[in-house]
Image: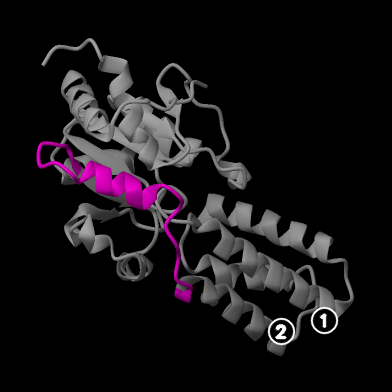
Amino acid sequence: MQQVETFNVSRIEQLLYFKKFCRRFDIQKILFDGDDTLWDTQPVFNQAFDRVSRLVSYDLDLPVKDVHQQILQLHNNLYETHSVSIKRWDILVDQLTTFYPLNDKVQTSLRANFQQIFNTPLPFLPGTKDGLDFLTSDFDLPSLAIVTHANPNWTWKKYRWLNLDKYFHWDDVYTIDDHHYKNTQTWSQAMDFYKVKPENCLVVGDSPRADINPVNQLGVACSFLIPRHSLWSIHNVAVDETKTKLINNINDLRYLGQYVTSFPG
């Protein structure tokens, strides 16, 4: 897949050429996934899985690696049946008790560890702040919005932790029902909410399954994938490489002007 390379011109030229890029492709809205696209969520989940695996391992004298693998498998299966509903964590603990003889005290501890995920402040990914500063630096640039799969309460916490109000009104954060899936239907609903057509959207996400493939099927003007080495295996599917380019982070969007340096106006 083609990587967007650095555009070695001055910052003002990057801005001017990026504006030409947006005019060339009639970009009216830039839509971002949130988790692991703008801010770093994966480590919080990994830490919870590690804590829970160690708790079970210590209680039952089992290899940590085996317990960890079992938890990940149950988690992946629950995505297929319960999407990202917050209720899936209680179900996961219930399912663990069918594999391991966990007493009530351990079960309570496991549930508390999973709930800790939603009370842990998250940091921006490298490049996010610089990218958002660039994309909001000129009134003539397309408007920005977030399309997230997390439930509204957790999304509101992230909004406050990260001071997202500097870049997005709360109405610019569209939350897909966490009992449903991020697919062509829900992405289409998000675009309808913002009164924009797919062909006038630039979309950035980290999940081929939940972000890139659905928006490509809808016919977005441009899509960009931020590759994650720790991406959940259920999200790691093939994408149409003729429609999507790789970027390291959203700050790389400033380099898109290199594709229209000869475009007039």
Q: Bin the neighbour count of mark 1 within 10 Å (Cα to Cα): few under 14, some 14-19, many 20 and up.
A: few
What residue sits 25% from the left and 15% below the top?
261
Which quadrant would residue 121 be assigned to in this image? bottom left
Distance, label 2 to label 1, CA atoms, is: 8 Å
Magenta stretch: dominant SS? loop
Query: Which residue matches tag 2?
Result: 106
Image quarter where the C terminus lies is top left
Which quadrant would residue 164 be assigned to in this image? bottom left
Residue sitting nearer the eye, 102 or 207? 207
In the rendered view, would you say 100 is above or below 15? below
Q: Bin the neighbour count of mark 2 within 10 Å (Cα to Cα): few under 14, some 14-19, many 20 and up.
A: some
User: Where residue 65 appears, x then y in whole percent?
Assistant: 82, 60
* Element assignment for label 2: helix
Q: Which mark is residue 204?
A: none
Q: Mark 1: which amino acid?
A: Asp
Residue sitting nearer the eye, 21 or 188? 21
Q: Which residues are magenta?
A: 119-143
Q: Which mark is residue 59?
A: 1
User: Where residue 178 appears, x then y in whole percent?
Assistant: 40, 58
What residue sits 34% from the left and 28% below the top?
255
In the rendered view, would you say 229 is above or below 69? above
Residue sitting nearer the eye, 71 or 148? 148
What residue sits 45% from the left and 53% below the top?
125
Sequence-wise first label, 2 or 1: 1
Which quadrant would residue 97 be assigned to in this image? bottom right
Q: Is residue 54 visible?
A: yes
